[in-house]
């Protein structure tokens, strides 16, 4: 038995990084690209960092103003970090760090600018062809997310985004187009980024403008939209299996590990229920059905999911091959939360954990939580796992010689990777690890540039000033060595 003891990361472990089209590409109005929800995200400079919800929130007026705005100045996601033009240079840097995999997403609006066209936009398709070719040239395997926080604004304004069943059909068509086109270039696919996030930011994840629906119906609308994404995800799995039988396709969850604040059974039960709710999203995509506890939750909230005949079979028949997830923080809950100190986080806030430090953006740093989460997920599902986002946003200082000594970032990753390695030794089947993000990019929640995640510094400020030059941070060399030694050097 002891000869079966796992000593560390398996051979072929997929080390790399993760980005999303709308946060890096830029080129918002070139190559035939249509306007997306991400192009509506104005940088609200007057807001405090911790007011995440207000950063996300969008009104009819803001959408109209954004559509009328003809440049990128107030809309940082329109410019990204100009990856659209500089990806070759960036790929060389990723290769220098020894990347085996890079997670990217495909902007739906590059392929179908309004989501409804008969024929796909060849120029957009060609861009991703060239991007994937460049990855392969550098020995980097693409891991591709079909939907990462963007959709055509046309579908939002004409159909109500994911609240409409019609969006399922249009997304299915988009999925088939790209699965067919890239079948010989992409072996790893993800369906929806953080599918659970629809309940936290309905516009960013689902194209739902809340003021367009009666306030007392909005929760039902959101869960209906989520059902549509579950069905669309299952259909993408179905087509992936048909088109590329050897490819692997996974779902993607924001893993929000929640601890009870005390050992009072009421707190333990509450934490249990919050974890159960977090797993609802992966349960559907892995087990192929809604968990029974949701029936009670829906009934108590007066939510009635409308299913079309055949939906249950679709969910049942087309489950994913692996579970990928993001892990940034852990949470604490209590029945007495109202009276307790709180922490921020755009993902979720909650009660402050006195044992943990926080990032510059008040996210609780919990490496041991990653080991717990990995073990817990693997025990639950018994399918391979993939960490596809983990990292810390920080304010970096660049000195006059263009050096960035980001020891805090090295410490963040070192502590998390050590715990991840322990989980592998515990027996967890783990396919790979992609840091968020290997290069500085535009923040999903606040559209800031100064919230830096990368091993590579990008010379651009919150207002879009800068040369866009790339500089290697100290953490760049550290991660390079981690990959070179397959995680032995930590
Ligand atoms: C995840 C998203 C990413 C990413 C990350 C960090 O929820 O999938 O797109 O941005 O969070 O969040 P932020 O950019 O807001 O710091």
Image (cartoon, grey):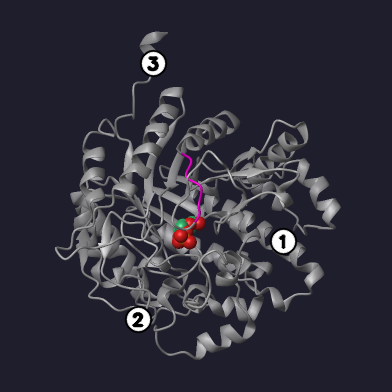
Among numbered discs 3 and 1, the one appearing first in the sequence: 3
Calculate the distance from the C-alpha at mark 3 to the C-alpha at mark 2.
Answer: 53 Å
Check mark 3 vs ligand 1: CB closer than 8 Å? yes or no. Answer: no
162 w.r.t. 238: above or below = below
Residue 231 percent across, percent down from the top left? 63, 55
Q: Which residue is mark 1?
A: 224
Residue farthest along the left direction in this orientation:
401
Residue 346 placement, left or right of 448: right
24 w.r.t. 152: above or below = above
Q: Is residue 436 visible?
A: yes
Q: Quadrant of residue 235?
A: bottom right
Residue 409 placement, left or right of 209: left
User: Is residue 364 highlighted in magenta?
Assistant: yes
279 w.r.t. 303: above or below = above
Q: Dot 2 surroundings within 10 Å: few (below 14), some, or many (20 or more)?
A: few
CB-based contact (under 8 Å), mark 2 and mark 1? no
Q: Quadrant of residue 430?
A: top left
SS state under label 3: loop
Quick one: quadrant of the N terminus? top left
Q: Which residue is mark 2?
A: 30
Which residues make up the magenta segment? 362-366
Q: Which mark is residue 5?
A: 3
Magenta stretch: dominant secondary structure: loop
Q: Is residue 146 visible?
A: no
**Who's the residue at 63% across and 66% down the image?**
202
SS state under label 1: helix
């Amino acid at each position: 038995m002891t000869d079966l003891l796992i000593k560390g990361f398996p051979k072929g472990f997929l080390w790399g990084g993760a980005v999303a089209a709308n946060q890096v590409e830029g080129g918002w109005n070139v190559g035939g690209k249509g306007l997306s929800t991400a192009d509506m995200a104005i940088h609200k400079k007057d807001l405090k960092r911790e007011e995440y919800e207000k950063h996300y929130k969008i009104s009819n007026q803001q959408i109209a103003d954004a559509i009328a705005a003809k440049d990128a100045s107030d809309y940082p996601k329109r410019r990204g970090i100009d990856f659209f033009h500089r990806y070759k240079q960036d790929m060389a840097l990723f290769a220098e760090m020894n990347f085996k995999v890079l997670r990217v997403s495909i902007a739906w609006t590059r392929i179908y600018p309004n989501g409804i066209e008969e024929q796909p936009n060849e120029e957009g398709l060609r861009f991703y062809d060239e991007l994937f070719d460049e990855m392969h040239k550098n020995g980097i395997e693409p891991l591709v997310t079909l939907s990462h926080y963007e959709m055509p604004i046309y579908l939002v304004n004409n159909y109500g985004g994911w609240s409409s069943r019609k969006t399922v059909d249009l997304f299915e068509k988009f999925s088939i187009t790209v699965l067919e086109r890239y079948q010989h270039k992409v072996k790893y696919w993800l369906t929806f980024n953080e599918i659970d996030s629809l309940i936290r930011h309905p516009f960013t994840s689902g194209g739902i403008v809340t003021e367009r629906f009666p306030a007392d119906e909005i929760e039902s609308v959101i869960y209906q939209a989520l059902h549509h994404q579950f069905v669309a995800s299952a259909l993408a799995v179905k087509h992936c299996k048909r088109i590329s039988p050897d490819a692997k396709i996974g779902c993607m969850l924001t893993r929000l590990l929640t601890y009870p604040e005390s050992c009072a059974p009421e707190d333990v039960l509450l934490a249990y229920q919050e974890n159960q709710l977090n797993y609802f999203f992966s349960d559907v995509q892995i087990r192929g059905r809604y968990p029974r506890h949701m029936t009670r939750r829906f009934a108590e909230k007066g939510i009635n999911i409308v299913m079309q005949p055949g939906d249950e079979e679709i969910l049942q028949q087309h489950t994913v091959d692996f579970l990928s997830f993001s892990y940034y923080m852990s949470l604490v809950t209590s029945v007495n939360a109202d009276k307790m100190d709180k922490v921020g986080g755009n993902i979720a806030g909650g009660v402050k954990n006195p044992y943990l430090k926080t990032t510059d953006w008040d996210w609780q740093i919990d490496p041991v939580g990653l080991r717990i989460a990995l073990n817990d997920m693997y025990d639950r599902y018994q399918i391979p796992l993939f960490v596809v986002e983990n990292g810390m946003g920080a304010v970096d200082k660049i000195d006059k010689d263009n050096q960035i000594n980001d020891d805090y970032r090295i410490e963040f990753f070192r502590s998390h990777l050590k715990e991840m390695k322990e989980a592998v030794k515990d027996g967890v089947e783990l396919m790979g690890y992609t840091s968020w993000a290997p290069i500085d990019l535009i923040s999903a929640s606040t559209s800031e540039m100064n919230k830096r995640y990368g091993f590579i510094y990008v010379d651009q400020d919150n207002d879009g000033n800068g040369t866009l030059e790339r500089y290697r941070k100290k953490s760049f060399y550290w991660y390079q060595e981690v990959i070179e030694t397959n995680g032995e050097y930590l």
